[in-house]
């Protein structure tokens, strides 16, 4: 959407009342120590004006970011890149459902760009409400199976919701589910961002046939559905643009997955007129994202905090931790925000932690202990992060946790 001409206020009196009420409720929630208040504030605002989300986005050029993994980090990188071209409003802390998005946009009256992370289930509805200029689709894999649909059903919802969209879709060409979902849109920019986790993409989303995956390529031998030719690509430590130029990626964030996130982010930035060199230089400023990758001091030890919510996320995280004998703390909960089904633990290849001293905490530490025992690993079950740190041998500790366990960990270590 075009920026609001002349700075005129696009909000109706009802919308202004809704925004004011939402901010007041959010402030009360913060004062009561119940978190940021963004979700409850957004719910109140939307109750007063159900069309508020669309109204708040009227003056913004919006990009939506959705995926199973990496959307919070990619949203942060895109926001940093687009800041080169004007003020940005973003739900940078990850409140990614309509209420949290509404709260974030309510603080962006002077912004030019809206960079919005969206939960996979809500992508089509939010896109309908805000009329985005671009949508970034990174990946789809199993996650919260008791809450979310299986991946093929999510891809179908995306495909239906994006059919005929006027937005530029920036999509990962290496994920067959993402490609199938994005292919209903007439304007797609394909990015070769990679796909290390392939266990959700062995059957063709188009016909159900068996997917052939020679090397980095993929195709269905039955219906002909295949990997599209990308115009952007991650090539080692460089972003390769559509003109064949290679731009160096220099991030403070670790791992191959974040280089892939930077590649998609550069493609998004280019859709808004920000050159790759400028975009990538600005991304270097990002040191951590909502506590992820932070190194904190706790009990006179260095802990690096890492979030891993599902099998694909754990696989990527294992690839970036320091090698043995670095001690590792694993923490798993199964609360509402995590999904209460812990069967996904059996899809994670924990043998990659062989040689690390392992300490297990969290609400579901016994579930995880059984999984590690079956994997043939040695580990210690602890009642708290304090006990785990006391028992850990010298050196920096890698602390890997799923969503609510990660929040528990941050509160305890003062991050």
Image (spheres, helix red, strand yellow):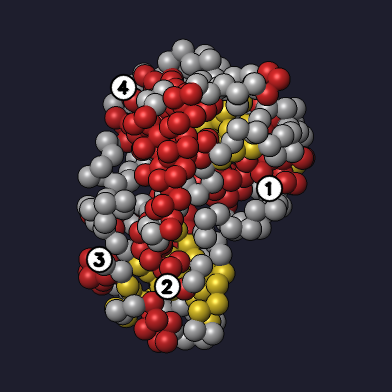
Label 4 or label 1, whichever comes before in sequence order: 4
Q: Nearer the viewer, mark 4 or mark 3?
A: 3
Q: Residues within 10 Å of mark 1 (few under 14, many from 20)?
A: many
Question: In the rendered view, would you say 91 is above or below 11?
Answer: below
- In the rendered structure, are the residues bearing label 3 and label 2 in contact, judged by CB atoms less than 8 Å apart? no
Label 4 or label 3, whichever comes before in sequence order: 4
Question: In the rendered view, would you say 75 is above or below 346?
Answer: above
361 and 182: which is toward the camera: 361
Q: Quadrant of residue 349?
A: bottom left
Q: Residues within 10 Å of mark 4 (few under 14, many from 20)?
A: few
Q: Nearer the viewer, mark 3 or mark 2?
A: 2
- In the rendered structure, are the residues bearing label 4 and label 1 in contact, judged by CB atoms less than 8 Å apart? no
* Badge 3 element: loop
- In the rendered structure, are the residues bearing label 1 and label 3 in contact, judged by CB atoms less than 8 Å apart? no
Q: Which residue is mark 1?
A: 283
Q: Which residue is mark 2?
A: 412
- Badge number at residue 322: none
Q: Residues within 10 Å of mark 2 (few under 14, many from 20)?
A: few
At x 37%, y 69%, the residue is 330
220 and 367: which is toward the camera: 367
Q: Tell me the CA gap for discs 3 and 2.
A: 18 Å
- Badge number at residue 364: 3
Q: Is residue 150 left or right of residue 18?
A: left
Q: Tell me the CA gap for discs 1 and 2.
A: 29 Å
Q: Is residue 215 left or right of residue 231?
A: left
Q: Tell me the CA gap for discs 4 and 3.
A: 38 Å
Q: Tell me the CA gap for discs 4 and 1.
A: 39 Å
- Badge number at residue 207: 4
């Amino acid at each position: 959407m075009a920026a609001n001409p002349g700075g005129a206020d696009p909000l109706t009196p009802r919308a202004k009342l809704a925004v004011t009420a939402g901010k007041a409720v959010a402030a009360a929630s913060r004062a009561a120590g119940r978190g940021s208040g963004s979700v409850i504030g957004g719910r109140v605002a939307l109750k007063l004006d159900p069309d508020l989300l669309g109204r708040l986005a009227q003056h913004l050029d919006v990009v939506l970011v959705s995926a199973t993994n990496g959307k919070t980090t990619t949203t942060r990188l895109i926001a940093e890149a687009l800041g080169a071209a004007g003020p940005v409003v973003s739900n940078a802390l990850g409140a990614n459902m309509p209420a949290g998005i509404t709260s974030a946009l309510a603080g962006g009256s002077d912004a030019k760009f809206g960079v919005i992370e969206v939960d996979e289930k809500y992508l089509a509805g939010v896109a309908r409400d805000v009329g985005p200029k671009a949508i970034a689709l990174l990946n789809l894999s199993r996650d919260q199976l008791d809450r979310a649909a299986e991946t093929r059903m999510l891809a179908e919802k995306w495909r239906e919701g994006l059919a005929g969209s006027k937005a530029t879709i920036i999509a990962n060409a290496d994920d067959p589910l993402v490609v199938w979902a994005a292919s209903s849109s007439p304007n797609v920019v394909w990015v070769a961002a990679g796909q290390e986790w392939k266990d959700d993409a062995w059957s063709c989303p188009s016909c159900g046939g068996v997917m052939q995956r020679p090397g980095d390529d993929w195709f269905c031998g039955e219906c002909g559905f295949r990997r599209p030719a990308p115009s952007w690509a991650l090539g080692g430590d460089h972003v390769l643009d559509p003109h064949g130029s290679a731009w160096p990626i220099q991030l403070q964030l670790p791992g191959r997955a974040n280089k892939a996130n930077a590649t998609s982010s550069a493609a998004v930035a280019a859709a808004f007129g920000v050159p790759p060199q400028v975009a990538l230089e600005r991304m270097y400023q990002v040191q951590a994202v909502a506590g992820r990758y932070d190194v904190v001091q706790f009990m006179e030890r260095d802990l690096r905090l890492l979030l891993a919510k599902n099998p694909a996320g754990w696989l990527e995280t294992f690839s970036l931790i320091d090698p043995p004998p670095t001690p590792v703390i694993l923490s798993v909960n199964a609360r509402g925000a995590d999904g209460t089904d812990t069967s996904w633990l059996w899809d994670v290849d924990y043998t990659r932690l062989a040689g690390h001293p392992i300490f297990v905490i969290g609400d579901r530490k016994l579930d995880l202990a059984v999984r590690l025992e079956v994997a043939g690993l040695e580990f210690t079950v602890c009642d708290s992060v304090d006990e785990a740190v006391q028992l850990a041998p010298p050196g920096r500790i890698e602390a890997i946790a799923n969503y609510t366990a990660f929040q528990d960990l941050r509160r305890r270590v003062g991050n």
